[in-house]
Image (spheres, grey):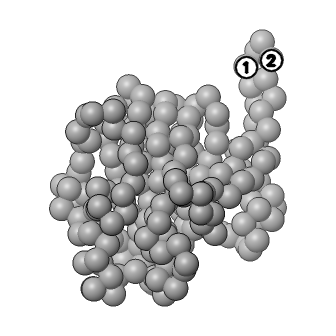
Amino acid sequence: MQVEQLSTASGVVIEGPLLITPQIFGDGRGFFYESWNQRRFDEAVGCSTTFVQDNHSRSCRGVLRGLHYQLEPEPQGKLVRCPVGVIFDVAVDLRRSSATFGQWVGAELSADNQQQLWVPVGFGHGFLTLSESAEVLYKASGYWSKSCERSLRWNDPDLAIAWPLGGMEPLLAQKDADAPELAAVMAAGEVFA
């Protein structure tokens, strides 16, 4: 597998998120690849990571889910992939002590490229469905917890995420439409150290 760090639109590398590209073996019959290997993943991220929950969502074109994250005591790192369709996947640095706090990276994940995005603890996560429909699978390092879950406004001007909307209005869950901006979550102390 190939592992690479991602950069912001201005070229700044954000430590933490990784784009993982598997080695795919294909022929006239189809393809095969290893989508998960504990040893290789731990080597890539530099520590041992335990996943406790697998999630699967299906969305139609224009659905934007996020930006979501969970605080202590149940923070979540997420390993995200899109085996059906195409999404634009985003990670936002919410580590107050980080030099890249409030900056974001994004990658197109698809059934064609089979890439995965590692979104570690300390980051908000969201995605936009670009294809007619898409299925997203992700491993989570913490259990879902309603009391720990937080949302961040997808279109916060301070984040300036370049969602590839192509002029369409995103389809949002009410909690995402009503999510606070970064300044409000900072004031509430709902970011990471």
Instruction: Let me know if residue 5 appears in the view.
Output: yes
Q: How far apart are marks 2 and 1 (CA)?
A: 6 Å
Q: How crowded is mark 2: few (under 14 residues within 10 Å), some or many (20 or more)?
A: few
Q: Position of residue 97 (x, y in %)?
A: 52, 85
Horizontal arrangement in the rendering, residue 143 relative to residue 61 (left or right): right
- Residue 69 vertical placement versus 175 (above, below): below
- Residue located beneath label 1 in the image: 30
- Residue located beneath label 2 in the image: 27
Q: Where is residue 100 in the image (x, y as percent from the top left)?
A: 53, 73
Name the amino acid type tagged 1.
Gly
The image quarter containing residue 178 is bottom left
Tags 2 and 1 in contact by the CB under 8 Å rule? Answer: yes
Report the residue that reaches farthest toward the top: 28
Q: Residue at left 56%, top 35%?
A: 110
Q: Position of residue 61 (x, y in %)?
A: 34, 32
- Residue 81 vertical placement versus 53 (above, below): above
